[in-house]
Image: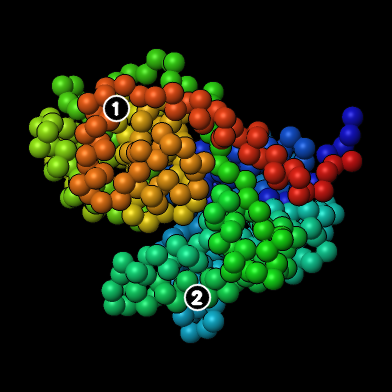
Amino acid sequence: MNKKQPLLYLVHRLPYPPNKGDKIRSFHLLKHLSKQYDIYLATFIDDKNDWQYVDIVKEYCRDVCVLSLNPTFAKVRALPALLTGQALTIPYYADSKMRQWVDETIAKHNITQAVAYSSSMAQYLEKHQQVSRYIDFVDVDSDKWRQYAESMKGISRWVYQREHRFLETYERKIVGEFDYSFLVSEKEAALLQKISSDNGAKVGYFNNGVDLEFFDPNREYDNPLPADKVNIVFTGAMDYWANVDAVKWFCEKALPIIKQRYANAHFTIVGSNPTKDVLALASDDVSVTGRVPDVRSYIVHADLAVAPMQIARGIQNKVLEALALNKTVVVTSAAYEGLVETEALDQLCYNEPDAFAQCCLEQLEKKTSGDWREYVTRFYSWDSCLSRVDEQLVPST
């Protein structure tokens, strides 16, 4: 039996539970890599609720370094970067204990390959030029900050524009220094290739997948949605600005139009840590659940799912998960970006409130969904998506 090679895996947030965008991708990458490598994992926890999952993560690893990250202290730590040419993201995740553990682990275990998940973790590998270094940027975060800036005013606009500029410079630097960079979709990869044109050949992608066994529409699920309502759902982490923006847009601009036809239309916002802005949307017509034990039950029993993203990067897991459960999802182009386009999905994509609401009404009147699961199975199984990673890493011997 061949001995597994050691591999260092650096993740900015504990890759479990796989219940939100970044954790879904980072966990499945961990699970996949652990089949072939002895994983040495370094990660942060910024939500005290996640400490209960550390032992589960350890099952996939030879050794782990898990450190607490206090978001308030991290913001304070990042502030001095405003006086330098550094992106705020980098000092936010800078930690001397993490750096020491990484340095010692590379030396002690003769680590020759390392994978950083997100640009914020690349800093721990910059000096280790003897190591084959790979990074999963996931999204081009610098462009996300550019999008945020366009919707802001005053000092917030200036800060976001600054983060866009300096983070783009850092992304370009990492692409040049690392052996290979992954993105979440072909379109995201093309954007980073454009930004890093001198090193475009070292930029590729692997799509997000879906756990098809977990997201099985044929299982029995309790119905948590209000009875005698036409139920529309949105799922996602509700402390994420883009999700907050999406549900506010839907409640203010699309839901009133839908209610002209369906007076009993009810919108349920499903996701952890809802902000004050999200909680303020709660009414007779809108429910805000907070963290739920099983998001699948809300999707399966809904009449329709929506993803009205105004700002988004890469592939939206919420869309893939709903489609895997054979639920129709009405989307904006921001939520559709990165998906394999089909004529059927094209007919569910609208950006203007009137057109978006009208599409929702048309789908509600159908009262049936198409065979969306076949689409997900064809293009978004994790094994198929992650094979692109295997093509780049040096194989075990």
Q: Residue at x 47, y 65 (%)?
A: 143
SS type, badge 1: loop
Q: Residue at x 38, y 50 (%)?
A: 333
Examine the image and state in which quarter residue 301 appears: top left
Task: Give how far across and how far down residue 116 sits, in percent.
Answer: 65, 56
Which of the two labelled residues, at mark 2 and mark 1, occupies the earlier sequence position?
2
Is residue 11 shown left or right of residue 314?
right
- Taking depth in this image into account, of 321 and 54 the one nearest to the observer is 321
Task: Give how far across and how far down residue 53 sits, in percent.
Answer: 53, 38
Task: Give how far across and how far down residue 167 sits, in percent.
Answer: 53, 71
- Taking depth in this image into account, of 360 and 168 the one nearest to the observer is 360
Is residue 274 shown left or right of residue 81?
left
The circle on residue 389 is none
Badge 1, how many Cα within 10 Å: few under 14, some, many 20+?
many
The circle on residue 165 is 2
Q: Residue furthest front?
A: 343
Badge 2, how many Cα within 10 Å: few under 14, some, many 20+?
some
Would you place residue 294 above or below residue 174 in this image?
above
What distance separates the C-alpha of mark 2 from that of mark 1? 41 Å
Visible residue check, residue 201: yes
- Taking depth in this image into account, of 107 and 175 the one nearest to the observer is 175
